Image (cartoon, rainbow, N blue to C red):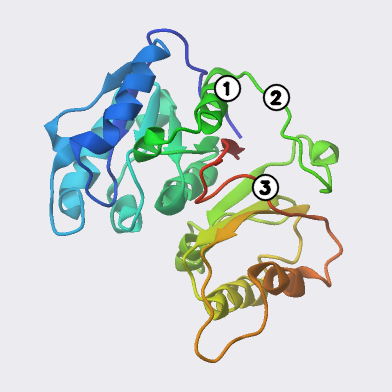
Amino acid sequence: MKTPQYLKKGSKIAIVAPAWKVTPEKISAAVKWIEEKGFVPVYDDRLFAEYNQFAGDDDFRASVLQEYLDRNDIDAIFCARGGYGTIRIIDKLDFTKFAEHPKWIVGFSDVTVLHAKMQQLGYQSIHGIMSKNFESDDKVPMESLYEALTGKWHAVEMQGSASLKSFEGTPIVGGNLSVLYSMLGSDLFPETDGKILFIEDIDEYLYHIDRMMMALKRAGKLSHLKALLVGAFNDMHESSLPIGMTAREIIAEKVKEYGYPVIWDYPAGHIDNNLALVLG
């Protein structure tokens, strides 16, 4: 996978809303952080457009994102928030000029669609906090993102988990499980054979997690992984007729026959300590 150029002082970061609408208040902390790090935030009033739940209709959101994908002076694109909507515009985008000047795509949750597109095209991207998350008092994810953007790294120590060191050089693919499930059967679903698959999710019924994992398994997407990297599965719900397993137990059941390592509780996903993870 190709690595976009790391950021330096003066690098320009565009802020976009490919899905749900966003308010100026929700990006102010991110703008301040970008400036404090010596970067230049780039956005205009189009960022705050509204069309029902979306930040403008599909054509509008696609046109704004297309502009920043095409611009050679933009070095990274921060997604303001997730929600739902990126999959509605992905086929409207042209990445020809992006390939002339690749830039970091940053976000998680619904942004899994853009990460999948990057993996299809052969570029790395960053699963990390979005603009609205900079309001948090927890600065660790912000520093983690800064390290990812500038090519400075430190080890993430995980108590009692298998090490990823033996898989150095193996690409990580994936993202939000629900969004991955929505892409199953399409050309956007990432190639998982020989890769480390990362998954996370929030606010789902446990039987939905079972259904999605069964779908990935039956489609052969879990059979030939090098490893499974499991992030946060928080705020899960049991239905009136309980399935009787936790999210961890559901996931473990689906992959127990394969023999590759499962790394549990990686600090990424819909949690405060959402550390940056380079995909691809």
Foreground residue, 240 or 23?
A: 240
The answer to whether mark 1 and mark 2 are in CB contact below 8 A is yes
Q: Residues within 10 Å of mark 2 (few under 14, many from 20)?
A: few
Residue 89, x across and y down, in percent = 28, 53
Q: Residue at x 50, y 76 (%)?
A: 205
Q: Is residue 249 shown left or right of residue 36? A: right
Mark 3 — residue?
266
The answer to whether mark 3 and mark 2 are in CB contact below 8 A is no
Q: Residues within 10 Å of mark 1 (few under 14, many from 20)?
A: some
- The amino acid pointed to by label 2 is His
Q: Taking 274 as reference, is 86 above or below it?
A: below
Q: Is residue 22 shown left or right of residue 46? A: right
Residue 31, x across and y down, in percent = 30, 24
Location of residue 15 by image quarter: top left
Mark 1 — residue?
147
- The amino acid pointed to by label 1 is Glu
Foreground residue, 272 or 68?
A: 272
- Dot 1: what SS? helix
- Dot 3: what SS? loop
- Calculate the distance from the C-alpha at mark 1 to the C-alpha at mark 2: 8 Å
Tell me if I can see residue 253 in this picture: yes
Label 1 vs 2, first from the N-terminus: 1
Q: Residue at x 84, y 72 (%)?
A: 257
Foreground residue, 197 or 140?
A: 140
The answer to whether mark 3 and mark 1 are in CB contact below 8 A is no
Residue 230, x across and y down, in percent = 67, 55
Mark 2 — residue?
154
Q: Quadrant of the N terminus?
A: top right
Residue 18, x across and y down, in percent = 29, 46
